[in-house]
Image (cartoon, rainbow, N blue to C red):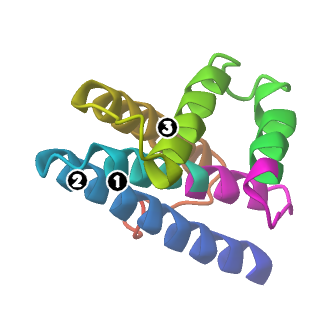
Amino acid sequence: MKGDRKLAEQLARMMNKARRALDSAAREIADDNFDFSCSRSYYAAFYCMEGLLLTKGLTYSKHSAVLSGFSEQFLKTNVFDRQLSKRITRLFRDRQLGDYGFDVPLDCAQAQQCLEDAKDIYSKTEEYLSKAKLLDAGKPGSS
């Protein structure tokens, strides 16, 4: 029981950080910083994926491993719709462009799409964790 409580507390912290990243992404759009917004949106989704993997006792040190692990554990097993893979791929690509690109600017529409994709992943994660009784409605990280 103690392990479940510790896991739930860690997941609440991760979801709180994901929520803060979503809020930051929205602020960046308002400030016309579309590249930074896409990066924050990606990280919101990334924190969600890390949290979901943690429920399986899995942690990874590389982004590629988190993406692969999430696909193996949650998409290929149909826990989440496989179409989510396209959205995650787009988030990762736009985050790469936003963080490292100088010649290919991201526009408002792309930043908005990244934010919507990340919000959807956040929502699906929150629903999954709540159903698994690993996220309490009143805890940080839940809406």
Q: Give the residue type that dot 2 points to.
A: Glu
Please give left or right for residue 6 compared with residue 19 in the image. right
Please tell me whether residue 91 belongs to the stretch shown in magenta.
no
Residue 72's disc is: none
Q: Quadrant of the N terminus?
A: bottom right
Q: What element does badge 3 sit on?
A: helix
Q: Is residue 27 above or below residue 91?
A: below
Residue 52, given in percent of the width and then of the height, sits at 69, 52
Please give the name of the residue rendered at 40% of the width and 44% of the height, measured from the top-left corner: 38
Q: Is residue 80 above or below residue 68?
A: above
Q: Residue 111 or 115: which is nearer the viewer? A: 111
Q: CA distance from mark 3 to mark 1?
A: 10 Å
Do residues under tags 3 and 2 come within 8 Å of each other at their CB atoms? Answer: no
Neighbour class for label 1 at 10 Å: few (<14), some, many (≥20)?
Answer: many
Q: CA distance from mark 2 to mark 1?
A: 6 Å
Q: Give the residue type that dot 1 points to.
A: Phe
Residue furthest front as drawn: 103
Question: What residue sits right under mark 2 in the picture?
Answer: 28
Q: Is residue 16 above or below residue 5?
A: above
Residue 119, given in percent of the width and then of the height, sits at 39, 39
Question: What residue sits right under mark 1 in the picture?
Answer: 36
Neighbour class for label 3 at 10 Å: few (<14), some, many (≥20)?
Answer: many
Question: What residue sits right under mark 3 in the picture?
Answer: 94
Do residues under tags 2 and 1 come within 8 Å of each other at their CB atoms? Answer: yes
Please give left or right for residue 10 compared with residue 113 in the image. right
